Image: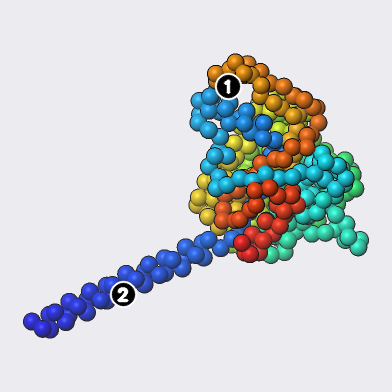
Amino acid sequence: MKNTIKKSLFLVSTFLLIFLLIIHIGKLTSVSNEKPKSVILIIGDGMGLPIITAYDYYKSEYKKQGYSNFSKFDGSFLVRTRSQDYVITDSAAGATAFAVGKRVPNYQVGIIENGNRVPTIMDIAKKMGKSTGLVVECTLTHATPAAFYSYSKSRTDDDNIARQFIYSNIDIAIGGGFEIFKPYINHLEKMGYTIIYGEEKLPDIAKSGKYYEKLVLFTAKNHPPRYKERKVHLDVKTEYALSMLSRNKNGFFLMVEASQIDWYGHENKLQEQLDEMEDLDKLLDVALSYHQRNPNTLVIVISDHDCGGLTLIDKKAKFFSLDFKINYSSDYHTAEHIVGFYKGSIKVNPIIDNTEIYKILHEYIKGMI
Ligand SMILES: [Zn+2]
């Protein structure tokens, strides 16, 4: 009898020990899963708070599809957007603040110090053994993407910027500008890039699970057309870039730009701005679900500046519709702070300078957050 009790006590304590061990191992694994690994930086060019507000109501009250995906983030913050020389920034100085962490004069992308280009956050990620990618709805040499891999005093020097792209070591780039890169296609191929022209080819490539060592997918000869005329949208492009980049066990840095929110802000066209916002909102679904599967990824949504000075002024409207009375006060950018959103374990102050985005990203990929 005594022996049986001893035996069962032994069995119970052994099971208990195994149970505790499993919990411990589980904890350890979840800790290592949390270690910062990858970054998805999403830039809505010209995406001020008014167009976020308008889109939020447009989606929920006009389209009756619920609130925008911005509400699914962990937190938000305001950003001071000024450049080195003006209170109102342009996209070149705005993107350089995010990419290099310093304010430069308007129209300049990147920074030169002692004759060398200062490494961008993408160069740093690459040096750490991560993969890098760009997905944009403008040419690959336009101000925002250019700030992540080049230096030019003038953002419009496309040829100079394209030549710098060749040596950027970026693993996947999806965007317009085939005409600009035409003289350098051989050079790109020599650097190991596969060149594909035509975004309509992407869904089949993605479906077949085909990956490339390095890929430039040109979506247009110059700038891609507007949302309704594009055949493949940011969600599909981002999904493919993520599946290609996430094969690197060291992680990745991906910058995605909803480039044209800004353009229709300049033109004061609300419907087109809302369409471009829809493109971004659908891309947020992809980014958030990637984060859910890979919590060691930081997702930041940010804008470089507001554009158009939209105000929503219909005091008689009980619901948002396309007849809602609005006013645009400018055909250029405005100085208002913009709103940033984050998903992931970071700490951020309520109002930050645009250059602090760089610091947050830098500290995250270094595992200092
Ligand atoms: Zn603009």
Label 1 lies in ligand 1 vicinity (Cβ under 8 Å): no
SS for callout 1: loop
Which of the 4 quarters of the picture holds residue 181? top right
Tell me if residue 305 comes above or below residue 160 in the rendering: above
Query: Which residue in the protein does label 2 denote?
Result: 17
Q: How is the image coloured?
A: rainbow
Q: Residue at x 80, y 44 (%)?
A: 82
Q: Nearer the viewer, residue 329 or 178?
A: 329
On the image, the x and y values in percent for residue 165 come to: 80, 51
Residue 333 percent across, percent down from the top left:
79, 34
Identify the residue at image location x=41%, y=65%: 26
Q: Residues within 10 Å of mark 1 (few under 14, many from 20)?
A: many
Q: Residue at x 79, y 49 (%)?
A: 96
Q: Amino acid at mark 1?
A: Phe
Dot 2: within a 10 Å radius of its alpha carbon, few (fewer than 14), some, or many (20 or more) residues?
few
- The spot of residue 297 in percent (x, y) is 58, 55
Res. 219 visible in picture: no
- Is residue 5 visible in the rendered image? The answer is yes
Residue drawn at x 37%, y 67% as measured from the top left: 23
Q: Amino acid at mark 2?
A: Leu
Drawn side of residue 292 relative to residue 325, left or right: left
Q: Which residue is mark 1?
A: 320
Q: Position of residue 39 (x, y in %)?
A: 63, 54
